[in-house]
Image (cartoon, rainbow, N blue to C red):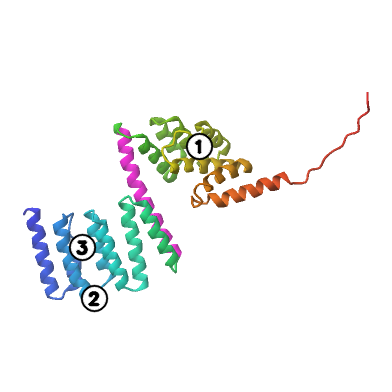
Amino acid sequence: WPQELRDTERILRADCLITAHADDEAFALLGAFPAHDDAVVDELVSRLAILIERGPRREHFSLGASLFAGAGRIEAAEALVAKGRSALGPEDALDLAIELAEIHHNAGDVERAGRLYAEALESAPEKGRVLKRIERSYTQWADREIHVLSARLDEGSAGEKDIARLVRLVLDRTGAAEALEILSRGVVSRALRSDLLGAVYLCMDRPALACAAFGASDGAGYSSDAERYDHLYLAGIARERTGDHGMAASFFAGIAGERADFRDSRQRALKNYTRFMESQCEERVLVLEKSEAL
Protein backbone atom coordinates (compact mmCIF):
# COMPACT_ATOMS: atom_id res chain seq x y z
CA TRP A 1 0.00 0.00 0.00
CA PRO A 2 1.08 3.61 -0.53
CA GLN A 3 2.16 5.42 2.64
CA GLU A 4 -0.94 7.62 2.54
CA LEU A 5 -3.26 4.61 2.65
CA ARG A 6 -1.26 2.96 5.40
CA ASP A 7 -1.52 6.13 7.49
CA THR A 8 -5.28 6.29 6.88
CA GLU A 9 -5.69 2.66 7.93
CA ARG A 10 -3.80 3.23 11.18
CA ILE A 11 -5.80 6.36 11.99
CA LEU A 12 -9.03 4.42 11.44
CA ARG A 13 -7.78 1.70 13.78
CA ALA A 14 -6.97 4.36 16.38
CA ASP A 15 -10.50 5.76 15.96
CA CYS A 16 -11.98 2.31 16.59
CA LEU A 17 -9.91 1.89 19.73
CA ILE A 18 -10.88 5.36 20.99
CA THR A 19 -14.55 4.63 20.34
CA ALA A 20 -14.17 1.40 22.32
CA HIS A 21 -12.51 3.39 25.11
CA ALA A 22 -9.34 1.32 24.71
CA ASP A 23 -7.36 4.48 25.38
CA ASP A 24 -4.02 2.86 26.25
CA GLU A 25 -4.03 0.81 23.04
CA ALA A 26 -5.05 3.85 21.00
CA PHE A 27 -2.25 5.91 22.53
CA ALA A 28 0.31 3.18 21.78
CA LEU A 29 -0.85 3.08 18.15
CA LEU A 30 -0.65 6.88 17.80
CA GLY A 31 2.89 6.82 19.15
CA ALA A 32 3.98 4.11 16.72
CA PHE A 33 3.44 6.15 13.55
CA PRO A 34 6.51 6.54 11.31
CA ALA A 35 7.72 9.89 9.95
CA HIS A 36 4.76 11.98 8.82
CA ASP A 37 3.74 15.26 7.19
CA ASP A 38 1.77 18.15 8.65
CA ALA A 39 -1.62 16.71 7.66
CA VAL A 40 -0.93 13.43 9.44
CA VAL A 41 0.42 15.26 12.49
CA ASP A 42 -2.82 17.24 12.77
CA GLU A 43 -4.83 14.01 12.55
CA LEU A 44 -2.76 12.37 15.27
CA VAL A 45 -2.88 15.37 17.60
CA SER A 46 -6.66 15.63 17.19
CA ARG A 47 -6.94 12.04 18.47
CA LEU A 48 -4.61 12.86 21.33
CA ALA A 49 -6.93 15.76 22.22
CA ILE A 50 -9.74 13.25 22.78
CA LEU A 51 -7.54 11.21 25.11
CA ILE A 52 -6.54 14.38 26.97
CA GLU A 53 -10.20 15.33 27.50
CA ARG A 54 -10.89 11.91 29.02
CA GLY A 55 -7.91 11.96 31.35
CA PRO A 56 -4.83 14.12 30.72
CA ARG A 57 -1.47 12.43 31.19
CA ARG A 58 2.03 13.77 30.71
CA GLU A 59 2.65 11.18 27.97
CA HIS A 60 -0.20 12.63 25.89
CA PHE A 61 1.32 16.10 25.86
CA SER A 62 4.84 14.74 25.37
CA LEU A 63 3.82 12.80 22.28
CA GLY A 64 1.90 15.73 20.83
CA ALA A 65 4.80 18.12 21.38
CA SER A 66 7.19 15.60 19.85
CA LEU A 67 4.93 15.24 16.78
CA PHE A 68 4.76 19.01 16.30
CA ALA A 69 8.52 19.38 16.78
CA GLY A 70 9.22 16.60 14.26
CA ALA A 71 7.21 18.56 11.72
CA GLY A 72 9.15 21.73 12.53
CA ARG A 73 6.20 23.35 14.33
CA ILE A 74 8.00 24.46 17.47
CA GLU A 75 5.47 27.14 18.44
CA ALA A 76 2.65 24.58 18.33
CA ALA A 77 4.73 22.24 20.50
CA GLU A 78 5.32 25.04 23.00
CA ALA A 79 1.59 25.87 23.12
CA LEU A 80 0.69 22.24 23.79
CA VAL A 81 3.30 21.95 26.53
CA ALA A 82 1.94 25.12 28.16
CA LYS A 83 -1.53 23.57 28.15
CA GLY A 84 -0.16 20.40 29.71
CA ARG A 85 1.74 22.26 32.42
CA SER A 86 -1.44 24.06 33.47
CA ALA A 87 -3.47 20.82 33.53
CA LEU A 88 -1.03 18.52 35.34
CA GLY A 89 0.66 18.41 38.73
CA PRO A 90 4.00 20.05 39.59
CA GLU A 91 6.20 17.00 38.85
CA ASP A 92 4.62 16.32 35.45
CA ALA A 93 4.72 20.03 34.65
CA LEU A 94 8.44 20.09 35.41
CA ASP A 95 9.06 17.10 33.13
CA LEU A 96 7.19 18.83 30.32
CA ALA A 97 9.25 21.99 30.81
CA ILE A 98 12.45 19.96 30.49
CA GLU A 99 11.12 18.19 27.39
CA LEU A 100 10.28 21.55 25.82
CA ALA A 101 13.81 22.75 26.53
CA GLU A 102 15.13 19.61 24.81
CA ILE A 103 12.92 20.33 21.80
CA HIS A 104 14.35 23.85 21.49
CA HIS A 105 17.88 22.51 21.98
CA ASN A 106 17.39 19.92 19.24
CA ALA A 107 16.01 22.64 16.97
CA GLY A 108 19.20 24.66 17.48
CA ASP A 109 17.67 27.38 19.65
CA VAL A 110 20.26 27.00 22.40
CA GLU A 111 19.47 30.38 23.99
CA ARG A 112 15.76 29.58 24.44
CA ALA A 113 16.64 26.10 25.70
CA GLY A 114 19.03 27.62 28.22
CA ARG A 115 16.33 29.90 29.62
CA LEU A 116 13.90 27.00 29.96
CA TYR A 117 16.52 24.85 31.67
CA ALA A 118 17.26 27.69 34.09
CA GLU A 119 13.56 28.01 34.92
CA ALA A 120 13.30 24.23 35.43
CA LEU A 121 16.33 24.24 37.70
CA GLU A 122 14.93 27.05 39.79
CA SER A 123 11.65 25.21 40.43
CA ALA A 124 13.01 21.65 40.68
CA PRO A 125 13.12 20.06 44.14
CA GLU A 126 15.75 17.59 42.88
CA LYS A 127 18.16 19.67 40.82
CA GLY A 128 20.43 16.71 40.11
CA ARG A 129 17.80 15.09 37.90
CA VAL A 130 17.38 18.26 35.86
CA LEU A 131 21.15 18.66 35.50
CA LYS A 132 21.44 15.12 34.16
CA ARG A 133 18.76 15.87 31.58
CA ILE A 134 20.55 19.07 30.59
CA GLU A 135 23.83 17.21 30.20
CA ARG A 136 22.21 14.48 28.10
CA SER A 137 20.44 17.03 25.89
CA TYR A 138 23.65 18.99 25.33
CA THR A 139 25.63 15.83 24.55
CA GLN A 140 23.10 14.66 21.96
CA TRP A 141 22.92 18.11 20.36
CA ALA A 142 26.70 18.57 20.32
CA ASP A 143 27.30 15.16 18.75
CA ARG A 144 24.80 15.93 15.99
CA GLU A 145 26.44 19.29 15.34
CA ILE A 146 29.90 17.72 15.24
CA HIS A 147 28.70 15.14 12.71
CA VAL A 148 27.20 17.81 10.42
CA LEU A 149 30.13 20.23 10.68
CA SER A 150 32.72 17.47 10.21
CA ALA A 151 30.97 16.43 7.00
CA ARG A 152 31.18 20.02 5.74
CA LEU A 153 34.87 20.18 6.59
CA ASP A 154 35.55 16.90 4.79
CA GLU A 155 33.76 18.04 1.63
CA GLY A 156 35.45 21.46 1.69
CA SER A 157 32.29 23.53 2.19
CA ALA A 158 32.92 24.56 5.81
CA GLY A 159 33.14 28.30 6.36
CA GLU A 160 35.15 30.09 9.02
CA LYS A 161 32.27 30.10 11.51
CA ASP A 162 31.65 26.39 10.89
CA ILE A 163 35.28 25.58 11.66
CA ALA A 164 35.31 27.72 14.81
CA ARG A 165 32.13 26.09 16.05
CA LEU A 166 33.46 22.62 15.29
CA VAL A 167 36.75 23.26 17.10
CA ARG A 168 34.94 24.50 20.21
CA LEU A 169 32.48 21.59 20.24
CA VAL A 170 35.20 18.99 19.73
CA LEU A 171 37.34 20.66 22.39
CA ASP A 172 34.47 20.29 24.83
CA ARG A 173 33.41 16.78 23.84
CA THR A 174 36.60 14.90 22.93
CA GLY A 175 39.62 17.01 23.85
CA ALA A 176 42.52 19.15 22.68
CA ALA A 177 44.24 16.71 20.31
CA GLU A 178 41.19 16.36 18.06
CA ALA A 179 40.52 20.10 18.19
CA LEU A 180 44.09 20.87 17.11
CA GLU A 181 43.79 18.43 14.21
CA ILE A 182 40.63 20.17 12.98
CA LEU A 183 42.21 23.61 13.40
CA SER A 184 45.18 22.48 11.29
CA ARG A 185 42.81 21.56 8.44
CA GLY A 186 40.61 24.63 8.48
CA VAL A 187 41.20 28.01 6.89
CA VAL A 188 40.40 30.84 9.31
CA SER A 189 41.60 34.37 9.97
CA ARG A 190 44.69 35.03 12.06
CA ALA A 191 42.68 36.52 14.94
CA LEU A 192 40.27 33.61 15.06
CA ARG A 193 43.03 31.01 14.79
CA SER A 194 44.89 32.66 17.67
CA ASP A 195 41.76 32.66 19.84
CA LEU A 196 40.96 29.04 19.05
CA LEU A 197 44.56 28.04 19.72
CA GLY A 198 44.43 29.91 23.03
CA ALA A 199 41.26 28.02 23.99
CA VAL A 200 42.99 24.72 23.15
CA TYR A 201 46.01 25.64 25.30
CA LEU A 202 43.71 26.52 28.20
CA CYS A 203 42.09 23.10 27.87
CA MET A 204 45.58 21.57 27.99
CA ASP A 205 46.30 23.57 31.17
CA ARG A 206 49.06 25.57 29.51
CA PRO A 207 48.01 29.13 30.36
CA ALA A 208 51.33 30.76 29.43
CA LEU A 209 51.00 29.50 25.85
CA ALA A 210 47.37 30.56 25.88
CA CYS A 211 48.42 34.10 26.85
CA ALA A 212 50.82 34.18 23.91
CA ALA A 213 48.14 32.92 21.52
CA PHE A 214 45.52 35.45 22.68
CA GLY A 215 48.11 38.21 22.51
CA ALA A 216 48.89 37.34 18.89
CA SER A 217 45.36 38.21 17.80
CA ASP A 218 45.67 41.81 19.07
CA GLY A 219 41.91 41.78 19.82
CA ALA A 220 41.16 42.85 16.26
CA GLY A 221 39.04 41.50 13.45
CA TYR A 222 35.90 40.56 15.41
CA SER A 223 32.59 40.90 13.62
CA SER A 224 30.49 41.27 16.78
CA ASP A 225 30.72 42.39 20.39
CA ALA A 226 30.01 38.79 21.50
CA GLU A 227 33.15 37.57 19.72
CA ARG A 228 35.21 40.37 21.24
CA TYR A 229 33.86 39.58 24.71
CA ASP A 230 34.73 35.91 24.23
CA HIS A 231 38.29 36.90 23.35
CA LEU A 232 38.66 39.19 26.37
CA TYR A 233 37.09 36.64 28.72
CA LEU A 234 39.38 33.77 27.70
CA ALA A 235 42.41 36.07 27.68
CA GLY A 236 41.45 37.09 31.22
CA ILE A 237 41.16 33.44 32.28
CA ALA A 238 44.63 32.75 30.88
CA ARG A 239 46.13 35.73 32.75
CA GLU A 240 44.34 34.72 35.93
CA ARG A 241 45.80 31.22 35.76
CA THR A 242 49.32 32.55 35.32
CA GLY A 243 48.91 34.79 38.37
CA ASP A 244 48.88 38.02 36.36
CA HIS A 245 45.88 39.37 38.25
CA GLY A 246 46.39 42.97 37.15
CA MET A 247 45.99 42.15 33.45
CA ALA A 248 43.22 39.68 34.21
CA ALA A 249 41.28 42.37 36.07
CA SER A 250 41.68 44.78 33.16
CA PHE A 251 40.34 42.23 30.65
CA PHE A 252 37.31 41.32 32.78
CA ALA A 253 36.66 44.96 33.65
CA GLY A 254 36.73 45.81 29.93
CA ILE A 255 33.84 43.41 29.43
CA ALA A 256 31.92 44.39 32.56
CA GLY A 257 32.14 48.08 31.68
CA GLU A 258 30.16 47.42 28.50
CA ARG A 259 28.08 44.40 29.50
CA ALA A 260 27.97 43.56 33.19
CA ASP A 261 25.86 40.43 32.67
CA PHE A 262 28.39 38.68 30.40
CA ARG A 263 29.08 35.41 32.24
CA ASP A 264 30.85 36.16 35.54
CA SER A 265 33.10 38.91 34.16
CA ARG A 266 32.12 41.44 36.84
CA GLN A 267 32.87 39.02 39.69
CA ARG A 268 36.15 37.98 38.13
CA ALA A 269 37.17 41.61 37.62
CA LEU A 270 36.60 42.32 41.32
CA LYS A 271 38.33 39.14 42.45
CA ASN A 272 41.42 39.70 40.33
CA TYR A 273 41.63 43.39 41.20
CA THR A 274 41.50 42.48 44.90
CA ARG A 275 44.26 39.92 44.47
CA PHE A 276 46.34 42.39 42.49
CA MET A 277 46.03 45.05 45.21
CA GLU A 278 46.86 42.50 47.91
CA SER A 279 50.01 41.51 46.03
CA GLN A 280 51.07 45.16 45.85
CA CYS A 281 50.59 45.64 49.59
CA GLU A 282 52.36 42.51 50.78
CA GLU A 283 55.08 43.08 53.34
CA ARG A 284 58.54 42.69 51.92
CA VAL A 285 61.74 42.00 53.82
CA LEU A 286 64.31 44.55 52.79
CA VAL A 287 68.00 43.92 53.38
CA LEU A 288 70.21 46.92 54.04
CA GLU A 289 73.84 46.50 53.17
CA LYS A 290 76.54 48.70 54.66
CA SER A 291 79.02 49.97 52.09
CA GLU A 292 82.19 51.91 52.60
CA ALA A 293 82.83 55.01 50.65
CA LEU A 294 85.68 54.63 48.23
Asked if 232 appears above or below 125 in the picture, the reply is above
Q: Which mark is residue 198?
A: 1
Q: Quadrant of the N terminus?
A: bottom left
Secondary structure beneath dot 2 equals loop
Residue at 60 percent across and 40 percent down: it is: 247
x and y percentages locating residue 170 in the rendered image: 41, 42
Q: CA distance from mark 3 to mark 2?
A: 17 Å
Asked if 276 appears above or below 159 in the picture, the reply is below
Amino acid bearing label 3: Gly
Q: Residue furthest top?
A: 294
Inspect the magenta stretch and tell me whether residue 288 lies in it.
no
Residue 181 placement: quadrant: top left
Dominant SS of magenta comes to helix
Secondary structure beneath dot 1 equals helix
Residue at 13 percent across and 58 percent down: it is: 39
Question: Which residue is identified by label 2?
Answer: 55
x and y percentages locating residue 28 in the rendered image: 20, 66
Q: CA distance from mark 1 to mark 2?
A: 56 Å
Question: Which residue is identified by label 3?
Answer: 31
Camera-side residue: 247 or 60?
A: 247
Q: Earlier in the sequence, mark 1 or mark 2?
A: 2
